[in-house]
Image (tube, helix red, strand yellow):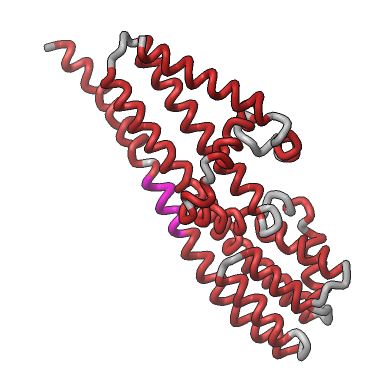
Amino acid sequence: MIIKSILLVILLFIVFMNLKNKKIYESFIESYKEDITLPIIAPYSLAVIDKLKLYKRMPKLINSIHQKMIILKGSKLSGDHTKIYLVKIITSVTLAIFFTLVYVELDGGNYTNLIYGLILTLILSFYLVKDLDKKVKQRKDSIIIELPEFVNKVILLVNAGDTVQGAIKKCVDQNQSKVFDSPLYFELNEAVNKMSSNTPFQEVMKDLNYRCGIQEVSIFTTTVMMNYRKGGALLVQSLKELSVSLWDKRKTITRIKGEEASSKLVFPIIFIFGAVLLIVIYPAIAIF
């Protein structure tokens, strides 16, 4: 009876908060409908964020999420996407608690399951926060893997008499199909668009460095800004030296990814070996 009452209170509270705040957050939800988890109950989650003043109560956590969103989504949209990710966490935790209570009720009020459910909810919350670290790392690795090839193309084009700006633009034009799949070419495309709108080249490079947020891109932009006015052999030589170190880092990351893939295969291989062993020895066991 107590569980049923709690479930009813939670359900009514979600419905009430949804109806009360639907118009307040309607434009925000419509703008990011594809990114928001379960838009149908998003007004409830957004209201929880604002009513509980989570930005003031949990500054370290939210600042950490915000910093990662700057890297993943850019500085302009990072604030909105931080709120969207908080909506995802609140929605997921609420649903986890709700369905845990439903399961406890269906199981005849076994409160041991409630403890397990709450532990799983805490694990889910921790996973959602840490998942951003994984996405940031994947983005960084993707940029480092693609950067050496891009630098080599720039070296070839500059050697052929092109300017650095022209070389970057040609590299992006040749890889337009990768712009929305590749973090590096997405940021480079943004840089080319800014150059096309007559933004000073040094400002474009600084902005590229800030948006990518990794040391390797910072070294590339610094090298280019220090030498692009001089051009010619000096710039090419500097980029060649950079290219060597970038290829070394790419090899390191590729090797690490290979080792991670191998470690993930250990359990399936053990399972398959056990199944094959059972098939082989079963006839002998059956005889005895």
In this view of the protein, which residue sits in the foreground, 276 or 40?
A: 40
Q: What residue sits 38% from the left and 37% below the top?
A: 122
The single residue placed furthest to the right in the displayed view is: 197
- Is residue 52 shown above or below 67? above
Q: What residue sits 78% from the left and 62% below the top?
A: 172
In this view of the protein, which residue sits in the foreground, 35 or 52?
A: 52
Q: The C terminus lies in which quarter of the figure?
A: top left
User: Does residue 20 appear in this view?
Assistant: yes
Q: Position of residue 228 (x, y in %)?
A: 75, 84
Q: Which residues are magenta?
A: 255-263
Q: Position of residue 9 (x, y in %)?
A: 48, 18
Displayed quadrant of residue 153: bottom right
- Is residue 62 shown above or below 231? above
Q: The N terminus lies in which quarter of the figure?
A: top left
In this view of the protein, which residue sits in the foreground, 40 or 185?
A: 40
Q: Position of residue 197 (x, y in %)?
A: 88, 67
In magenta stretch: residue 160: no
User: Does residue 137 appear in this view?
Assistant: no
Residue 162 is left or right of residue 38, and the answer is right
Q: What residue sits 88% from the left and 72% below the top?
A: 198
Most prominent secondary structure in the magenta stretch?
helix
